[in-house]
Amino acid sequence: KNEVEQSPQNLTAQEGEFITINCSYSVGISALHWLQQHPGGGIVSLFMLSSGKKKHGRLIATINIQEKHSSLHITASHPRDSAVYICAVPDYLLETSGSRLTFGEGTQLTVNP
Amino acid sequence: DTAVSQTPKYLVTQMGNDKSIKCEQNLGHDTMYWYKQDSKKFLKIMFSYNNKELIINETVPNRFSPKSPDKAHLNLHINSLELGDSAVYFCASSQDPGNEQFFGPGTRLTVL
């Protein structure tokens, strides 16, 4: 079973700052997910990436498969970016061809105006 | 149109009762999931169905029984509710196992 560690657990930033959230996992994977959970509770998938880098607006996700590490960056952070950011990695189950996600504990980001 | 919907959004009930949470997705996905998010906000898989077949069944009390009448629906029935069942339950779907997952809005279950 994959072990997933995220850091930091809590992060407070001023509007406009560059944010980095890190995720490490223990077992090699084919892809990693980054999710965002809004203060209201809804969960949104931000990225699913298997190599290199992906960009969506001010969000950038990178992954290093060899080092089993991924980072989520937010450029020019804004108070509306305040949320919990969660990374998740799949465990593949050969016996059923199923795949379950193992989640990190999440990073609570607060961006102050 | 909501991609993954759950009902009800809030559920308050007494210990010992039986309740169901419904989930529907209109994305044409083959795989659906139930997750539990505890008070510490930690998400954990409970069940997964692919093409109406159970493919993941984590260590969950057998008071929890998922039912998938068709690929678009995955319902969760809970018997003899206990205080520890209080949590937020999320349904999700993906095109197939391992693909990007789309989450429902969650159902906050409170057992008194």
Image (cartoon, rainbow, N blue to C red):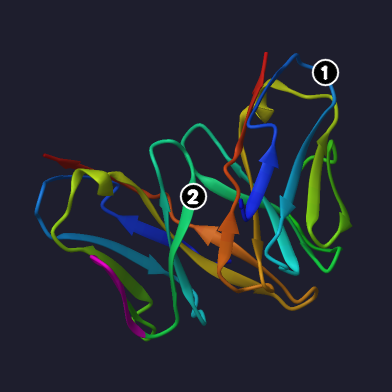
Q: Residue at x 54, y 47 (%)?
A: B43
Q: Amino acid at mark 1?
A: Gly
Q: Can you see residue B59?
A: no
Q: Nearer the viewer, residue A57 or B89?
A: A57
| Real-space Cα separation, disc 1 to disc 2, in angstroms | 30 Å
Discs 1, 2: same chain: no
- Which residue is nearer to you in this view: A83 or A103? A83
The amino acid pointed to by label 2 is Ile
Say left or right for A23 vs B1. Answer: left
Which region of the structure is painted magenta?
A: A52-61
Give how far across and how far down residue B3 sits, in percent. Answer: 62, 56
Q: Residues within 10 Å of mark 2 (few under 14, many from 20)?
A: many
The residue sitting at 80% across, 53% down in the picture is B73
The quarter of the displayed image where residue A98 is located = bottom right
* Callout 2 secondary element: strand
User: Pointer 1: what residue?
Assistant: B16
Q: In what quadrant of the picture does the N terminus of chain A appear?
A: bottom right
For label 2, the residue is A43
In the structure shown, which secondary structural element does the residue marked by tag 1 occupy? loop
Rendered view: B41 above or below A62: above
**Front of the two marks 1 and 2:** 2
